[in-house]
Amino acid sequence: MISVNNLTKTIEQRPILQDINVNIHKGKLTTIIGPNGAGKSTLLSAITRLTDYDQGTITIDEHAIDDYKSNELAKKLSILKQTNITELNITVEQLVQFGRFPYSKGRLKKEDKVKIQEALSLLNLTEIKDRYIKTLSGGQRQRAYVAMTIAQDTEYILLDEPLNNLDMKHAVQIMQILRHLAHHYNKTIVVVIHDINFASCYSDHIIAIKDGQTFISDAKDQVVQAETLSQLYDMPVKVEEIESQRICIYYDELEASAQAES
């Protein structure tokens, strides 16, 4: 389990995270939601040691994150950042190979090659594995980076907006894959996501952050409530149940009134 306790982060005297307290449970798909600028990506970066913080503690399996050596942490936890380099003069397969670096140090063994091919197949990239990253569409590149992260084969997988640049089909596929990894391979998946309906349909647990603070952290059905989400996003959100899934309907009240009048 990842435990975040009393986490505070300030940049130029502006509070980014304020006394965050959350637990991320093993073998679950947890999504982090909230308005733009709420601190979602900063929280993810703090958990993965990509950014420091002012106060608080972060532990992974009851060990302080700062106590892990870099290579040990890279075998336990992987992250896909929100922004990645796109003009790389390497192939898809070569990019995915980077995921095995904590184990191979650049000298791929049989086990590394198996993990690479599994990740390529899982993300439907086998047919384009020899294409150069810079020649791909945004969606293809995003899937390649997700494959690299999965090839790292860590117990904890953290992804910052992995659905960026993906069409509906591939966004669904990514979420299905992540849920499969959590439920069938006991991976602990944490995803920063903007689409509340993807969070509702695929999450086990949802962490909602607003203004740098924990707004709510609970099982998805406890979070996906009309009143809760309306307060989180400062706009009317309606929740309907369709085929046992809670679907959020959100709209601008003034625009809705204008359309009704017309």
Image (cartoon, helix red, strand yellow):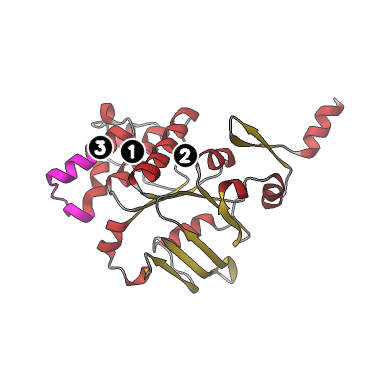
For label 2, the residue is: 163
Q: Which mark is residue 185?
A: none
Which residue is nearer to you in this view: 9 or 221?
221
Q: Secondary structure at mark 2?
A: loop
For label 3, the residue is: 118
Query: How dense is the environment of label 2, judged by Cα within 10 Å: few (below 14), some, or many (20 and up)?
Result: many
Q: Quadrant of the C terminus?
A: top right
Task: Name the spot of residue 174 as percent of width and height, x first.
Answer: 42, 36
Give the vertical position of 219 relative to 131 (above or below): below
Task: Name the spot of residue 202 as percent of width and height, x first.
Answer: 50, 40
For label 1, the residue is: 144
Pointer 2 or 3: first along the chain: 3
Pointer 1 or 3: first along the chain: 3
Give the vertical position of 233 relative to 130 (above or below): below
* Residue at position x 30%, y 52% in the image: 154
Query: How dense is the environment of label 1, judged by Cα within 10 Å: few (below 14), some, or many (20 and up)?
Result: many
Determine contact: label 2, label 1, CB under 8 Å.
no
Task: Name the spot of residue 148 as percent of width and height, x first.
Answer: 30, 44
Which residue is nearer to you in this view: 55 or 255?
55
Q: Secondary structure at mark 3?
A: helix
Instruction: State how many labels appear.
Output: 3
Task: Name the spot of residue 257 as percent of width and height, x first.
Answer: 83, 33
Measure how far apart labels 2 and 3 are at the Cα level.
Answer: 20 Å
* Residue at position x 27%, y 48% in the image: 99
Q: Which residues make up the magenta segment?
A: 102-116
- Judged from this view, the residue extending furthest toward the front is 244
